[in-house]
Amino acid sequence: MTRLYFVRHGKTEWNLESRYQGAGGDSPLLSESYREMKQLADHFQNVPFNHIYASPIKRARITAGTIARRLKSHPVISLMSRLEEFDLGKMEGMKFTDVKEQYPQEFENFRNHPVLYDPTEIGGESFVDVINRMTPAIIEIVRSNPQKNVMIVSHGAALNAEINHLLGTPLADLRKRGGLANTSTTILDSSDQGQSFSLVKWNDTSYLNKKLDETDLV
């Protein structure tokens, strides 16, 4: 069995400001995020991670490196472009409220109706596009780490879509489990080399010892 620990990157300035970051946008991690990365690493000190795979986007890359340095197993980090966040085109850098006003249909469907989301007007990727690029990467990771624990550090919207897909959730229902918080961990197991996955834990933030607010979740 391979156990996958999916970690969303630490909270950033744009997360706090309720701005879309996407694959092309980025902003600095908050100082509090480094403390939360430490809390996550401390929580998983007794897990012998074989490897960490991370999106190369700075906020995810720094999160992965910060965690890896604190783990006893000191796992090697590999960056994989297939683990990047959604390309959100014109929405990147915009506040949610401004996107809702300028692109109301895209805003509503991206948040609540994945099967209806059409990024043609804003440019970027659909849910199917993201799932189709991420899934081969996850299968490759599983097959490269039989009977091992691995950590995958990526982004909220992309992880939400991909993890639900791996669990067999229909596209229309991708949002039903709720969002993923910054520095959260979602755990899946695969005992058949990535042919199927089972959910162990969704959006675990118990180690952060704080009450989540709406800017923490995607």
Image (tube, rainbow, N blue to C red):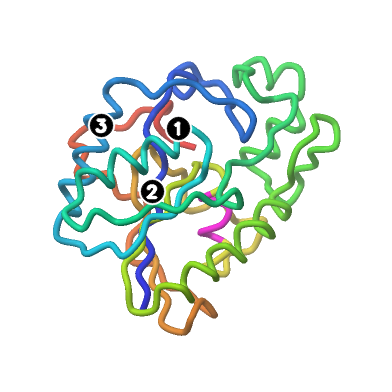
User: Is the residue marked by circle 2 packed among few (<14), some (14-19), or many (20+) residues within 10 Å?
Assistant: many
Of residues 96 and 74, the one drawn nearer to the viewer in this rendering: 74
Quarter placement of the N terminus: bottom left
- Disc 2: which residue: 7
The secondary structure type at the circle numbered 1 is helix
Q: Quadrant of residue 128?
A: bottom right
Residue at 39% x, 24% y: name it. Answer: 29
Question: For the residue marked with disc 1, what is the amino acid?
Answer: Arg
Where is residue 83? Give x, y as percent.
Answer: 55, 50
Q: Mark 3 highlights which residue?
A: 211
Amino acid at pointer 3:
Lys
Q: Who's the residue at 31% across and 67% down the image? A: 149
User: What's drawn in magenta, residue-wise?
Assistant: 159-164
Q: Which residue is mark 1?
A: 59
Q: Secondary structure at mark 2?
A: strand
Distance from disc 3 to disc 2, alpha carbons, whole Å, reads 18 Å
Determine which quarter of the picture holds residue 140: bottom right
Percent across and percent down for residue 66 are 29, 38
> Residue furthest toward the right?
120
First along the sequence among labels 2 and 1? 2
